[in-house]
Image (cartoon, rainbow, N blue to C red):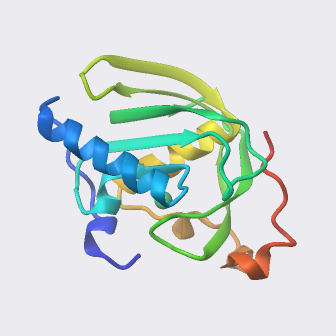
């Protein structure tokens, strides 16, 4: 947090080529090494519209439903309904901290896989939350900017007792 690139709007991917495959591979390695639920290309210094996410058994998010491994290039989100819910989030670019963030409960997303094949899904709960968090990175937005009450922002260990299991 504080790096200008993380506050910038990322550029669309134009070519589904070996360079993109190599970027995705670096993003996977970083996400998995740090036990992240997701990662956006700007977080490793590349200002392109690429996100990856995956939730299997994740010690940083012990109470959430699994989310399939997904690479999403040039993503577009469409919220379904106005309904939002609050949930605790962390971010590999904001280490050691957590905050309570409102997100749309349900949404439709589309984009492309690294081979240029279309992906289209309707999701809810933690899956919807992860996608919103990652796509925010492509708009230069970090989750602290979304916290509605900054009393619900702080260090992981100080907040441990207040962090309730994720709602889905
Ligand atoms: Ni993040």
Q: Is residue 78 left or right of residue 41?
A: right
Residue at 62 percent of width and 28 percent of height: 123
Q: Quadrant of residue 139?
A: bottom left
User: Residue 93, image x and y in percent?
Assistant: 44, 69
Q: Is residue 3 left or right of residue 126?
A: left
Would you place residue 2 above or below residue 26 in this image? below
Nearer to the camera, 52 or 126 = 52
Would you place residue 167 above or below residue 110 in this image? below
User: Residue 111, image x and y in percent?
Assistant: 36, 27
User: Residue 15, image x and y in percent?
Assistant: 12, 31
User: Residue 164, image x and y in percent?
Assistant: 85, 59
* Tally of marks: 0
Residue at 13 percent of width and 40 percent of height: 19
Q: Quadrant of residue 52?
A: top left
Does residue 12 appear anywhere in the picture? no
Nearer to the camera, 88 or 52 = 52
Q: Is residue 100 left or right of residue 37?
A: right
Quadrant of the image containing the C terminus: top right
Would you place residue 53 above or below residue 90 in this image? above
């Amino acid at each position: 947090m504080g790096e200008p690139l993380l506050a910038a709007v990322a550029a669309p991917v134009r070519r589904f080529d070996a360079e993109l495959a190599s970027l995705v591979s670096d993003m996977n390695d970083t996400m998995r090494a740090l036990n992240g639920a997701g990662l956006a290309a700007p977080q490793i210094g590349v200002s392109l519209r690429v996100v990856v996410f995956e939730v299997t058994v994740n010690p940083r998010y012990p109470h959430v439903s699994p989310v399939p491994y997904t690479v999403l290039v040039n993503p577009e989100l469409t919220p379904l309904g106005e309904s939002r819910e609050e949930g605790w989030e962390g971010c590999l670019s904001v280490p050691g901290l957590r905050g309570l963030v409102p997100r749309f409960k349900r949404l439709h997303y589309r984009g492309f896989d690294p081979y240029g094949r279309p992906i289209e899904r309707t999701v809810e709960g933690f899956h919807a939350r992860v996608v919103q968090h990652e796509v925010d990175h492509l708009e230069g937005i970090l989750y602290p900017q979304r916290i509605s009450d900054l009393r619900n922002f702080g260090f992981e260990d100080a907040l441990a007792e207040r962090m309730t299991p994720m709602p889905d």
